[in-house]
């Protein structure tokens, strides 16, 4: 039978073993999510973190959840306290948790219990160099990544830094889930192009949910 809904959002695109793109999966929630990003940022403002090597990152970051990803002169770590405010990170909004768990489930990862959500804000030129998400103790849990606002080119490689890269454009509402065989695959974001998005203006936001 002809499936009239096959091309209507959301739809899934396989990316790698254990990794899938849920296209436009967060579109219906985008406005609500962005409102909550604003609320989080009122309590724990976006800041450009400094790497242990002394480089100021081009991406501005904050977190919500029980723990948040941060940097200090010794390395990268998850901390219960926002080092900038001295307070706990803002709680993870229920809508964040619900979306992240539903996306993990749809990608084949049941019982995802994220305790951290890193929120990245990219302005034109900002990028995230190729890296692995390896600061989490629980490598059985996937990473769930939600893109909002301006589009960006996502690079997805393999276990070795010099493995060949796939490049995919991530647009407003797209969700990427990676785990299992690809949990430690290298990935990054190419420098953001200028633009004016109806929902976010000159920015791209990305939420990554982790079970640390
Ligand atoms: C990340 O690797 O933490 C973020 C990726 C993205 O911004 O899409
Ligand atoms: Fe990452």
Image (spheres, helix red, strand yellow):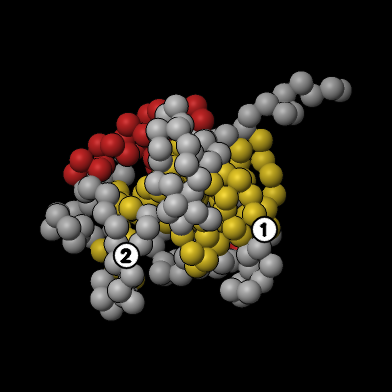
Quadrant in the picture for residue 175: top right
Q: Is residue 86 visible?
A: yes
Q: Is residue 125 left or right of residue 6?
A: left
Expressed as whole percent of the image width and height from the top left, the position of residue 45 reads 22, 47
Identity of the residue drawn at 58% across and 66% down: 185
Q: Position of residue 27 (x, y in %)?
A: 51, 30
Comparing 68 with 105, the one in front is 68
Q: Is residue 91 above or below residue 182?
A: above
Mark 2 sits on what residue? Answer: 56
The residue pinned by badge 1 equals: 166
SS type, badge 2: loop
- Side of 114 relative to 44 (left or right): right
* Helix, strand or loop at mark 1: strand
Could you give the CA–CA distance between mark 1 and mark 2, rounded to whole angstroms? 27 Å
User: How far across and down, in percent of the image, does residue 105 sit?
Assistant: 56, 45
Looking at the rendered structure, which numbered label has been put on residue 4?
Answer: none
Q: Nearer the viewer, residue 159 or 65?
A: 159
- Between 63 and 139, which is closer to the camera in this rendering? 63
Between discs 1 and 2, the one toward the N terminus: 2
Q: Quick check: can you spot residue 181? A: no
User: Badge 2: how crowded within 10 Å, few (<14), some, or many (20+)?
Assistant: few
Q: Residue at x 59, y 58 (%)?
A: 155
């Amino acid at each position: 039978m002809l499936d009239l809904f096959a091309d209507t959002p959301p739809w899934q695109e396989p990316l790698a073993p254990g990794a899938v793109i849920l296209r436009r999966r967060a579109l219906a929630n985008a406005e609500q999510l962005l409102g909550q990003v604003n609320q989080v940022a009122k309590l724990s403002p976006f800041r450009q973190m400094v790497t242990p090597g002394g480089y100021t990152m081009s991406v501005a970051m904050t977190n919500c959840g029980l723990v948040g990803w941060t940097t200090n002169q010794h390395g990268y770590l998850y901390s219960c306290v926002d080092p900038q405010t001295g307070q706990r990170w803002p709680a993870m909004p229920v809508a964040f948790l619900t979306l992240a768990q539903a996306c993990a489930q749809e990608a084949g990862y049941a019982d995802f219990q994220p305790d951290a959500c890193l929120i990245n804000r990219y302005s034109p030129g900002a990028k995230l160099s190729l890296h692995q998400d390896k600061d989490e103790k629980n490598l059985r849990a996937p990473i769930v990544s939600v893109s909002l606002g301006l589009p960006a080119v996502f690079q997805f490689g393999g276990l070795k830094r010099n493995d060949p890269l796939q490049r995919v454009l991530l647009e407003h509402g797209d969700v990427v889930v990676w785990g299992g065989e690809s949990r430690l695959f290298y990935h990054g974001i190419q420098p953001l192009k200028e633009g004016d998005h109806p929902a976010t203006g000159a920015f791209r936001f990305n939420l990554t949910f982790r079970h640390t």
